[in-house]
Amino acid sequence: MSDGVTLPPQVPVPGRPVRGSRTGRPVMALLDLLGRRWTLRLLWELRGGPLRFVALRKAAGGVSQSVLVVRLAELTAAGIVEEVEDDRAAREAGPLGAGVGGTACRLMTDRWSAMAAALTGRPAGASRRGRRPREPARSITTSKRSW
């Protein structure tokens, strides 16, 4: 980062080789960070405002404590998530995180539903032939992991 902060080697930053790129181009460093398990979900949950550790873990539904600690450290080191000034146990999306999270939210809602409507020929949110929407498929795996 430009403010003289030294980041741990596991945090992807521009200029260093990252997953999927030996060049470390900025977009590849961002995609590496955002592509890590639970990262986008955590940003999604922080979109509404600051959350304390336990509340964030509960809201994310299923993230382990150790993964949450690592992801918050990575996102904080990258400047995407910040500690709340009055409450060091709480985190909120910083200006960069709000931008990334806001962009992801708009992409997932507006553009995704428009694309689905174009592909199906139905307006966004319309049910099939007036029937109730299908229930989400249930997982038949026996693994405890959520993929």
Image: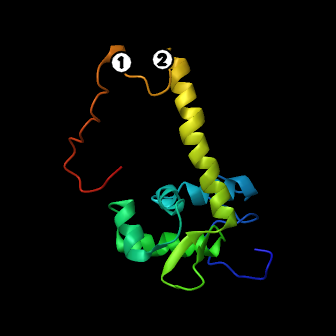
Between 61 and 122, the residue placed more toward the observer is: 122
Mark number, residue 122: 2
Above or below, 23 relative to 7: above
* Mark 1 Cα shell of 10 Å, populated few (<14), some (14-19), many (≥20): few
Residue 33 locus on image (x, y percent): 59, 60
The answer to which of marks 1 and 2 sits earlier in the sequence is 2
Q: Quadrant of residue 59?
A: bottom left
Q: Quadrant of residue 38?
A: bottom left
Give the residue type at disc 2: Arg
Where the N terminus falls, by quadrant? bottom right
Between 49 and 97, the residue placed more toward the observer is: 49
- Asked whether the beta carbons under mark 1 and mark 2 sit within 8 Å of each other, the answer is yes
Residue annotated with mark 1: 128
- Secondary structure at badge 1 equals helix
Q: How far apart are marks 1 and 2 (CA)?
A: 8 Å
Mark number, residue 89: none
Residue 26 locus on image (x, y percent): 74, 57
Residue 74 visible in the displayed image = yes
Residue 63 visible in the displayed image = no
Give the residue type at disc 1: Arg
Residue 121 locus on image (x, y percent): 50, 14
Between 71 and 95, the residue placed more toward the observer is: 95
Above or below, 82 relative to 61: below
Judge from the rendering whether residue 51 lies leftward or rightward of residue 131; answer left or right: right
Q: Quadrant of residue 65?
A: bottom left
* Mark 2 Cα shell of 10 Å, populated few (<14), some (14-19), many (≥20): some
Residue 139 locus on image (x, y percent): 24, 42
